[in-house]
Amino acid sequence: MRAFNNPLKNSVSGPVGFLIVAVVLFWIKTYAGYIVEFNLGISNSMQEFLLLFNPISTAVIFFGLALLAKGRKSFIWMIIINLLLSIVQYANIVYYRFFNDFITWPTLTQTSNISLDGGMMGSIAELLRIYDPLYFADTIILILLVVFKKFKPSEGRLKLRKTAAVMATGAAILVINILLAEIDRPQLLTRTFDRNYLVKYLGTYNYTIYDGLKTMKTTAQKASADSDDLVEVQNFVQANHAEPNDKYFGAAEGKNVIYIHLESFQEFLMNYKLNGEEVTPFINSMASDKNTLYFENFYHQTGQGKTSDSEMLLENSLFGLPQGSAMTTNGTNTYQSAAAILEQAKGYSSAVFHGNTKTFWNRDEIYKSWGVQNFFDSSYYDMNEEDVVSYGLKDKPFFEQSMDYLESLPQPFYTKFITVTHHFPYTIDEEDTTIEPATTGDGSVDRYFQTARYMDEAIEEFVNDLKESGLYENSILVFYGDHYGISENHNEAMAQILGQEEITEFDSAELQKVPLLIHIPGVEGGVQSQYGGQVDLLPTLLHLLGVETDDYIQLGTDLLSKDHKEIVPFRNGNFMSPTISKINGKYYDAEGNLIEETEEAIQMAEYAQTMLDMSDKIIYGDLLRFYTPDGFTAVDRSNYNYNIDQDASIDSKTTDTE
């Protein structure tokens, strides 16, 4: 009698069944690795679910490719694919154990870090764990299943519709994964905050693919660029160069530079009183100090990159990109940055202080390209639970713990302190509040004033420490707001705060003003009413320190120069000026009244757009590699290492030039 052929049984015991087993084993192994090895900062149930969910699409899609092979080969292909993916996972695990970070495609080219004489290879043995073979247990199990013939191979290729169904299932799972990730973290793939975020939401494998595609795109743009592309940029920069103001050029020569990054601090906070009480009394007092230049019409010019864009603008006089963050996508470019210029022109040492992980916004990579000698990230600080908020160490302990490192730096130094407490959604512990919240009914707006007060108090303590250390009198203090803190989504509450009936488009543009205070002991200060933006700060600072800028590629101009153009481009193509402004395709006069489009308005808009276009050409094409100013040497990234043993002395934490 002819045996009954059960297609379901054949399917389960054949290639599809083998695939299901491979997917399940791979899924369990991957998730276990996430939990045991990575500190991804899971903060809600959606993130918990996505961490569990994200390995499935990778497994289904990649293992599904093996179904295209004939007979027993489909099993072998699945085992090989499983092994390759396991190697990717394990390589990231070992890398994470050492660097607390994930591998990027550019880091794979940095083979100089892997050496037998004290480099990464010398520490490999210490990174291994006795349970590490378990990360390949699924591969071994699959091999045994084939050896002992627990699954029956198909006689030929599996029917195409079955393979297509498997691939479509994997693709659908991936789409669901991405959609859920976007719900919990909007603009995840366009802003690319941090590699931790990408792994948390998409998984190690999808992150690796994404990083590879991003690297290919960047490489292709670089590959097609040549020195001719720089000619237009050079002509634009030279035509718009602003000669320094004789009164201020070199006025701060030889002084230390201390940037104080005012997170999410908008200009409207200056001298603002809530219930009759100044919100930021200390910063207000610094603005009115006789030795402070206070710029009251200074705008942030950031885009999607927010804080990272502000750093790009300040350090290089270049804009962020129209999408994403240049610091994450173009971290290995050639730059003519403040730290490198001041080191070579005036012998400055340099450092950045930030109580967050070094990988956030790719700082540990791009700071090397900028020639930053020292990067004091969260690994240098006591990150106890009571003193840590969402984005790192609270401002008061951050400044307090930074002082020893600052005092150990060779002078003159160029430094930047990045604060984090005053960050959306402006949550703060009750014991840290010294001012009542506002009462608009919008929680984040109401708390905004409490975290601003906390930051103000932290900065006052820091400045007092500078005075006690003797550094205050020999240092320029530069206070700057990095970007807006309250978005247009909160206009109803902001209207209450400002005592207005509504917030118009023009009002919203005006609210993009952020503070800029430059305090120089011994130099006459005062309120400065000229319009400017973050792109203008680098040439302004360099001229104050006595450094000529006419040979560098900088899109901004000295705020103190009589040649400074008071047109402030925004990343979206809008611009502000003392006379005409463009907002969402409409033109306004200085009072915010709609006006007709004029030839002057068109020319100003074209100038603003050209600045943005020139910046994008420079970054996308990595054009500065084709031009080295006289007396300047391009930064060699291999000279910088931010991963030195934290128990070492401050001297050993400086640039590694071996």
Image: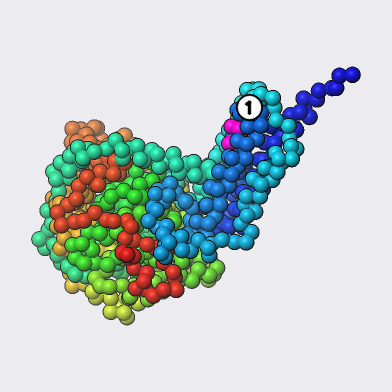
In this view, the residue farthest toward the left is: 246
Q: Is residue 244 above or below residue 619?
A: below
Name the spot of residue 195 as percent of width and height, x first.
48, 50
User: Which residue lies at the image location 50% right of the left edge and 61% below the top edge?
Assistant: 124
Which is nearer the eye, 112 or 648?
112
Along the line of sight, the residue nearer the viewer: 189 or 259: 189
Q: Is residue 546 left or right of residue 4?
A: left
Query: Residue at (56%, 44%) from the top-left corner?
Result: 85
Between 462 and 412, the residue placed more toward the observer is 412
> Nearest the camera: 205 or 441?
205
For the question of whether residue 351 can be seen, the reply is no
Is any atom of residue 175 visible in this view? Answer: yes
Which segment is the magenta one? 62-66
Q: Residue at x 31, y 40 (%)?
A: 222
Q: Which residue is mark 1?
A: 70
Q: Main secondary structure of the magenta part?
A: helix
Q: Quadrant of residue 653?
A: bottom left
In the picture provided, is 542 more to the left or to the right than 56? left
Q: Amino acid at mark 1?
A: Lys
